[in-house]
Image (cartoon, rainbow, N blue to C red):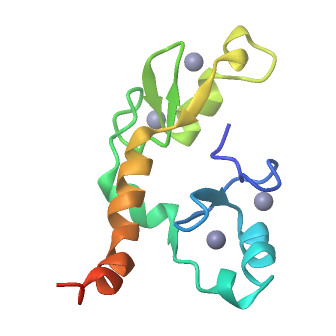
Amino acid sequence: MKIQCDVCEKAPATMICCADEAALCAKCDIEVHAANKLASKHQRIHLQSLSNKLPRCDICQDKTAFIFCVEDRALFCEDCDESIHLPGSLSANHQRFLATGIQVAMKSNCAKDDEKNSLGTT
Ligand SMILES: [Zn+2]
Ligand SMILES: [Zn+2]
Ligand SMILES: [Zn+2]
Ligand SMILES: [Zn+2]
């Protein structure tokens, strides 16, 4: 499993939209955010740019871990996730989520714009 696009649930996601709190593939990003002017202002973060804030893969200890497996209680990079959770194998049924570090990194990245808006109240 790659990080799947929340919209089409088929393609691997390449970015996260702060406003939608959704992972999007390049194609859906264009479709969703070209729909209207408000959506086109959504701040988006490339998953690549989050890499340095995220933990390492528990298996190869080398690549960035994007995926957390509930059954294994381990963090996986995309490559190790694919090789361990092979389609058709027992482990393919493991429940996997986006690593929580992504959510954290996402929030800290997305906060920048809000700061500007919330200044001036004091
Ligand atoms: Zn998509
Ligand atoms: Zn959006
Ligand atoms: Zn790995
Ligand atoms: Zn697993």
**Is residue 50 toward the left or the right of residue 18 in the image?**
left
Residue drawn at x 44%, y 17% is: 73
Residue nearest the viewer, comparing 30 with 91 = 30
| Residue 40 placement: quadrant | bottom right
Q: Which residue lies furthest to the left in this view?
A: 122
Q: Where is residue 88 in the image (x, y as percent from the top left)?
A: 81, 16
Q: Quadrant of the N terminus?
A: top right
Q: Where is residue 29 in the image (x, y as percent from the top left)?
A: 71, 72
Residue drawn at x 23%, y 90% is: 120
Q: Is residue 101 above or below residue 24?
A: above
Q: Position of residue 42 (x, y in %)?
A: 58, 78
Q: Residue furthest top?
A: 90
Q: Count the numbered circles shown.
A: 0
**Is residue 37 toward the left or the right of residue 17 in the image?**
right
Q: Is residue 40 above or below residue 2?
A: below
Q: Where is residue 19 in the image (x, y as percent from the top left)?
A: 56, 68
Residue nearest the viewer, comparing 89 with 106 = 106
Residue drawn at x 57%, y 58% is: 21
Ligand 4 placement by image quarter: top right
Residue drawn at x 71%, y 23% is: 86
Residue nearest the viewer, comparing 79 with 7 = 7
